[in-house]
Amino acid sequence: MPALPEYRTRILLENHEVPLVPAVFHNTMPEILPEPVVYLKAQIPGATSRAGRGLVRRASTREEISNGLKELLSEENCQGVLVAEAVDIKKEYYAACLLDLGDGETLPGGVLLFSAEGGTGIEGRTGSLLRIRFSLLNPPSAAELERKLEETSNSQQLADFLEKMIATFISYKLTVLETNPIAVLEDGSHLAVDCRAEFEKHAVSKKNVHLFELPENSVDDSTQLEKVIEAINAADPAGTGFFRASREKVPDGTIAVATNLCGGGGKMLWEMTTGGRDDIFSLNESDTSGGLSGFKSYRILRVIMSQPEAQVLILTGSGMAFQNQFHLASAVWKALRESPSPLPCLLRFGGTDQEKAMELMDTVSEDLPVKVKTFKPEIFPNAMVEHLSETATRERVKQKFIPEPGELAFTVETPPARFVYHPDKNPERVEPLCIKECPTGFLKWSGGRITTDPDAKCIGCLVCETVSLLQGNGELTIELDLPGEVL
Ligand code: SF4
């Protein structure tokens, strides 16, 4: 999902009167230098962990300001430098708004994450975050927020700040809006010191295009794997399937992690977990969310796993995913069976059928050629990464998947798949268990053969294949092509 640099996120917040630390954006060297002390922040779209990479600097003298500006302005992809006043902070909070697409029982809404301790190191305190779900149509008033926050803070100013932040989040249809820290000054005023936003390109209204820097004639620097993902999305457009490979080399001494992050919440939790660590390197950004099919999850996982430097796969969402987690686990299992170089994984399932998902992985993990560890949604990624070094591998497993021969039963165009029936696995010609497990009624058994109901639809959930392999005799398998060379 595209991310806005801080200086652009500030414009959105300013439009809703969220108080911000005074700052000026420069995209060239200014003729008159600002008064020290200031913070210089390079504005590079998508850049995370800026402080660790020297892209945020405190400048206490004019010389430091001048040198810092020159260096940061020459950074690759730098759009400019935000020069922010240094303020005397008495207390810090953390707040973020996330889009929650809901599930079968809850409508889409927003989630406010709040911590009474903000600033650096928030990644180590993810377990202590307060979560407040809110309606996008009828968001909470400042008074309601004040009541909900009373155990952590009884400040009316903070509630006013959060009300305006939520209004910004809803007004621009953002998927993530984060302010960290919210600084409380000596006089009790609250200011956003740092902020960032993520959005869906399709959700940006025409009147706001200029705020979201959607390049019309941008140079296509897509990698081969990113082009494969584009083709997967074109053939199966439902749900979000985003993948972007890091353009940086894997630093020595780090664990190279391939990530399958689900939704803005998964991405944010992962960034909070890894933001302060220099021993973990994310090979790619990703987002699989919005109720995508199991077929699409499988294809995207195959792409993610095919990154040659990867040592381990992390899969996590916010913990309350819209996608059925059993369908997702079926996709993970299929990818691990069929990938020529499967990755050991740390998998965090959270959402509908999360127990079934974990049970499936526990059942099949003994027969897999790689280590697999599952986590409940209560276990946050900052605890998951404690298992990275014992799970990651330097020697990738190689395997050759040879599909069992069978008869092509039928094909499905969207999401695309070939269904293969294996009559030799069903010599008695009895109705296989998988037929009744199809959640849409698309599969039928007629005249000793698998057929389909023309009035029903295949949603690409993979349940039939999983049931056939685990509870049946392997009578039905599904072949999912990849649009390009993926190892
Ligand atoms: S046939 Fe039914 S069970 Fe199989 S993938 Fe399609 S919807 Fe799912």
Image (cartoon, rainbow, N blue to C red):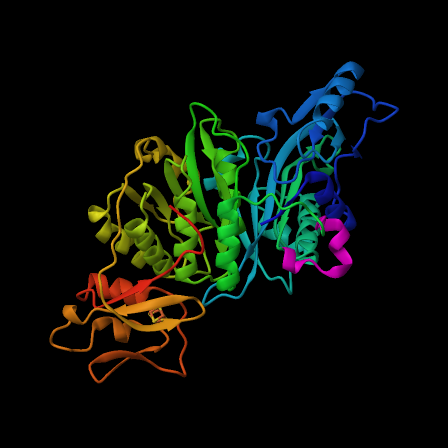
Task: Identify which residue is drawn at 47% across, 37% down.
Answer: 283
Residue 387's image quarter?
A: top left
Q: Main secondary structure of the magenta part?
A: helix
Is residue 58 at all visible to an observer of this figure?
Answer: yes
Task: Identify which residue is drawn at 33% across, 42% down.
Answer: 343
Count of marks, rendered view: 0
Compare residues 276 and 421 and report the one nearer the observer. 421
In this rendering, would 394 be left or right of 246?
A: left
* Location of residue 278 in the rendering, given as x and y in whole percent from the top left corner: 48, 26
Task: Identify which residue is drawn at 47% across, 50% down.
Answer: 318
* Location of residue 379 in the rendering, given as x and y in whole percent from the top left corner: 39, 44
- Residue 172 higher or lower than 183, as above or below: below
* Location of residue 78 in the rendering, given as x and y in whole percent from the top left corner: 70, 33
Which stretch did the figure color magenta? Answer: 201-215
| 113 drawn magenta | no
For the C terminus, give its image quadrant.
Answer: top left
Compare residues 323 and 44 and report the one nearer the observer. 44
Task: Identify which residue is drawn at 78% across, 19% down.
Answer: 66
Find ligand 1 in the image and state its quadrant. Answer: bottom left
